[in-house]
Image (spheres, grey):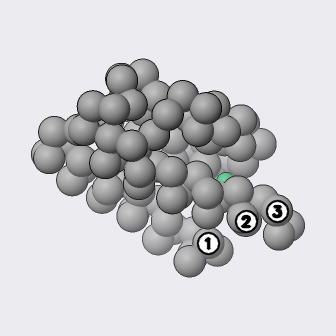
Amino acid sequence: MAKRIADCGMVTERLSAFLDGDLDAAECGRIARHAKTCPRCTQLTAELRRTVGLCQRAAKTPLPPELRRRARASIRRLLEKDPQTR
Ligand SMILES: [Zn+2]
């Protein structure tokens, strides 16, 4: 489903922006909406919620480097399991 893949790409891209402290509430909403329809992104966002408090902390606050590093590793790990969006 082409649209779903595009949305998955959007989520991955926005999650990366989030790690840089550059994600606003509207974008967070888009991610959450997509994740509801997509098991892969549900897993991805659940992991980040646990590790870095995705969408719970102020979006404009950059994450501490250590958390950022761990979150990026989590994203990478999950993406490697599902090469569809690369
Ligand atoms: Zn997805």
Which corner quadrant of the figure contains ligand 1?
Answer: bottom right
> Mark 1, residues whose alpha carbon is within 10 Å: few (<14), some, or many (≥20)?
few
Residue under label 3: 3
Q: Which residue is identified by label 1?
A: 85
**Residue beneath the point at 25% across and 38% down:** 62
Labels 1 & 2 near each other (Cβ < 8 A): yes
Q: Please state the horizontal and vertical placement of residue 20, each as a whole percent of the image.
A: 31, 48
Question: Type of residue at label 1?
Answer: Thr
Between 39 and 54, the residue placed more toward the observer is 54
As drawn, the label of residue 52 is none
Looking at the rendering, which quadrant does residue 49 occupy? top left
The amino acid type found where label 2 is placed reads Ile
Mark 2, secondary structure of its residue: helix
* Disc 2 residue lies near ligand 1 with CB under 8 A: yes
Q: Is label 3 in a helix, a strand or a loop?
A: helix
Number of on-image labels = 3
- Please tell me whether mark 1 or mark 3 is closer to you in this view: 3
Q: For label 2, count other residues whose C-alpha is less than 10 Å away and answer few (under 14), some (14-19) or many (20+).
A: some
In the picture, which quadrant includes the C terminus? bottom right
Tell me residue 56's x, y (percent): 42, 22
Q: Which quadrant holds the N terminus?
A: bottom right
The correct choice, above or below, for 39 with respect to 80 in the image is above
Left-right relation of 50 to 13: left
Kindly identify the residue that appears in the image at 39 percent across and 64 percent down: 76
Q: Is residue 46 visible?
A: no
The x, y position of residue 82, in whole percent, is 57, 69
Distance between the alpha carbons at the discs numbered 3 and 2: 5 Å
According to the image, label 2 marks what residue? Answer: 5
Q: Check contact, mark 3 vs mark 2: CB within 8 A.
A: yes
Give how far apart the Cα atoms at labels 1 and 2 are. Answer: 6 Å
Q: Earlier in the sequence, mark 1 or mark 3?
A: 3
